[in-house]
Amino acid sequence: MIQRNPCIANIKAGYLFPEIAKRRRDYAAAHPETAQRETRIISLGVGNTTEPILPHIGGGLAEGARRLTTAEGYSGYQDEGLLELREKIAAVFYKNIAGEALKPDEIFISDGAKCDIGRLQLLFGAGTAVAVQDPSYPVYVDGSVLIGAAGAWQGSGYAGISYLPCTAENGYFPDLSALPAGCLFYFCSPNNPTGAAASRDQLSALVKAGRDKGVLIIFDAAYAEYIRDPALPKSIYEIDGGRECAIEVNSFSKPAGFTGVRLGWTVVPKELRYAGGESVNADWARVAGTVFNGASNIAQAGALAALDEEGVKEMKALCDFYLGNAALIRDRLRKLGIPCVGGDNSPYIWAQFPGRDSWEVFNEILEKCQVVTTPGSGFGPAGQSFIRFSAFGHRADVEEAVRRLARL
Ligand SMILES: *Cc1c(COP(=O)(O)O)cnc(C)c1O
C-alpha cells in the first residue's frame, strides 16, 4: 500500500477541540442531570459564533442565491474573487493604511482565514524556520508540521518552532529580539487566545523587527472589527513598512457571523519579495489558483451587503453584542479575584490560575459550574495555568454561566 506522509505522524494526538468535546461528552454521560435545562452544560469554550446573521447581510446572501437561478444573474468560477468585493474591502477595511490604497490584485478572496493560512504554507515548504506567539491559534503550528517545517512533538512544543512567550510579565507582547532571522512569523492581533490587542508602538516594533531581520509576518486580523479603542491599529498596513514584510489574513467569520457561510480574504502586497527578489504576490496568485477555485458567489454577495452602510452597522452591532458578553465574563472573574485580560477589544478573556495545570482548572470549572472552557496549555507552553473564556454564546447562557462561576 501507499506510504503515509511522514509529517502527519508528527502531529500531536488529540487536537485541542476534539479533546475538549470528548471530556464534555464523558462528563455528560456520567452526570445524567446535565440533560435537564437548569443543570445543562454551557460552553464558553470553542470560538464559534452563535447569533443569527443580521437581516441586511442575510438579505444579501438570499439575493445572491436567487440571482444564480436567473439567466442574467448567473455566474460560475470567480477565481480570486469579485472585483467589486475586493475594491470594497480595500475601501472599508483599509482606509487608514499608510501610503497608497490597496489595489484589488493585492486582495485575494478566500473561503476563510484558516483555510488560507493552511494554503499559504505552500509558499514556503519544508525547512522554513517558523516562529509563533506563545500561546497561539493551533493552525499556525500544526500546519507547519504538515508541510515539514516543524518536526516531532517534544513534550510541550514542536521541534523546529520558535515559541515567543506572551505572558503577564511582557504584557502579552513577545520579546522580538528572540525572533530568528529569515523566519516566517505568525502574529495575531487582537489575539486568540489572550485577547491582547497590539498597540501602534508594538506593531511598529514588529514591522521594524520584521524588516531588519528579513522576517515574513503572517498577520492574522480575524478579530480586527472587535477593536473599540480608536488608538489601536486594525491592520498591519497602518504601520509604515508593513507592506514590505507582511501578509494579512482576515475573515467575515467573526464580525458577520460567517463561520458557517465561509468567506475571508488575504492581502499580499506587491512590495513583498522573497530573499531571491521574486514576487510573493505573483506566487500566491499561482498557488491559490492551483489548489483553490474561488469562494462561493453566494457568500461574496453576502459580504458585499456586509460592506455597505447598513451592513457595516450590523457588523458593529454583532461585535458589540459579543463584547457585551465578554464584559459580563470579565467582570465576574475580576469580582472573584481571578486575574484576567482581554474582552475589551476582543471576544476572548484570558484568565490566570497561578501554579495550576490548565486541564485541572478546566475539569474543576466543568465539575463545579458545568461550564466548558478552553485550557490555555492547548495553545502552547506559555498557556499553562491559563483558561480561555470565549464570549461567543447566547446572552441568557452567558448570564447563567457567569452566575455559576461564583461557585469557583
Ligand atoms: C476564527 C479565527 C479565524 C477565522 O477562520 P475562518 O477560517 O475565516 O473561519 C482566523 N484566525 C483566528 C485566530 C481565529 O480565531
Image: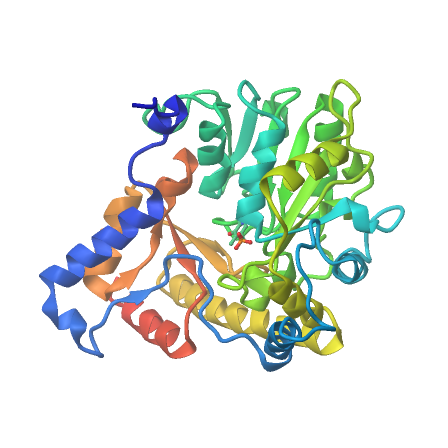
- Report the quarter where the C terminus lies: bottom left
Q: Is residue 24 above or below residue 162?
A: below
Question: In the picture provided, is 12 more to the left or to the right than 74?
Answer: left
Q: Position of residue 335 (x, y in %)?
A: 39, 66
Is residue 119 visible to the viewer in this orientation of the structure?
Answer: yes
Is residue 175 visible to the viewer in this orientation of the structure?
Answer: no
- Report the quarter where the N terminus lies: top left
Residue with the most extreme right position = 100
Question: In the picture provided, is 100 more to the left or to the right than 207?
Answer: right
Q: Position of residue 2 (x, y in %)?
A: 34, 23
Viewer-proximal residue among 26 and 58: 58
Residue 302: image quadrant is bottom right
Q: Is residue 162 above or below residue 256?
A: above
Residue 398: image quadrant is bottom left
Residue with the most extreme front position = 71
Q: Residue at x 71, y 68 (%)?
A: 304
Q: Residue at x 58, y 31 (%)?
A: 122
